[in-house]
Image (cartoon, grey):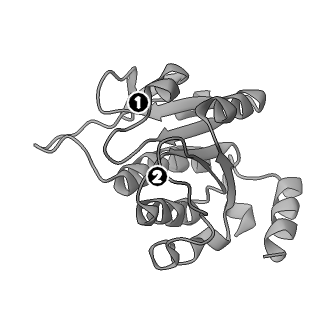
Amino acid sequence: MAEGRLSGLRLVIEDVHDPHNAAAIMRTCDALGIQDVWFVFVQEKAYNPRRVGKSSSSSANKWLSFRTCKSVAECIAALKEERYTSIGTVLKDADASTEGYDFLQHEKIALWFGNEHRGLSEEALAHMDVRMNMPMRGMVESLNVSVAAALFLATIAQGWRGAGRTLDAGAVQTLVEELSGR
């Protein structure tokens, strides 16, 4: 399992209200080999990702790595320090679309999803390197946040896996040691 994890792809969930939506996203992360999920709670009440949505996540939350940030600024600073490109998902005013976008141009991506009703905060959007949407072909303009996350993440994961962007042997060993203690 650890050998199949992707290197350099992190998911950031800002103020997702419903823990079951977050748990469904975590299940997708585990399935696609995305290890790191960060939470930002500013407007919504914080919840512990290890303790919510066991049925929704099918216990995937047991096998993922989490970080909770108390502000967008804290999260952005940590991501910049680690040289992540922040891609924020938006419905309107996008710089790019998932269709035809070359995700391989980035060594590390932090993919941001916002609140079910409000989307990403203005503060988060101001710090995004890329604002991205997924073209919608129907009459409905949006998807549930967990479904949108699954589609975005699957698109990125497919390209990265094809390019061999999985964890190196040292990172695999570190992850195995971390997970064996749970």
Q: Residues within 10 Å of mark 2 (few under 14, many from 20)?
A: some
Q: Give the x, y percent position of residue 87.
A: 51, 31
Tell me which amino acid carries mark 2: Ala
Task: Tell me the SS state at disc 1.
Answer: strand
Left or right, residue 97 beside residue 123? left
* Mark seen at residue 132: 1
Residue 164 seen in the figure: no
- At x 77% / y 28%, what residue is drawn? 81
Q: Is residue 98 above or below residue 12?
A: above
Q: Give the x, y percent position of residue 149.
A: 43, 50
Task: Tell me the SS state at disc 2.
Answer: helix
Left or right, residue 55 beside residue 86? left
Q: Is residue 176 above or below residue 152?
A: below
- At x 84% / y 75%, what residue is drawn? 181
- Residues 144 and 150: in front is 144
- At x 81% / y 52%, what residue is drawn? 168
**Residue highlighted by disc 2:** 154
Tell me which amino acid carries mark 1: Met
Where is the N terminus found, in terms of image quarters?
bottom right
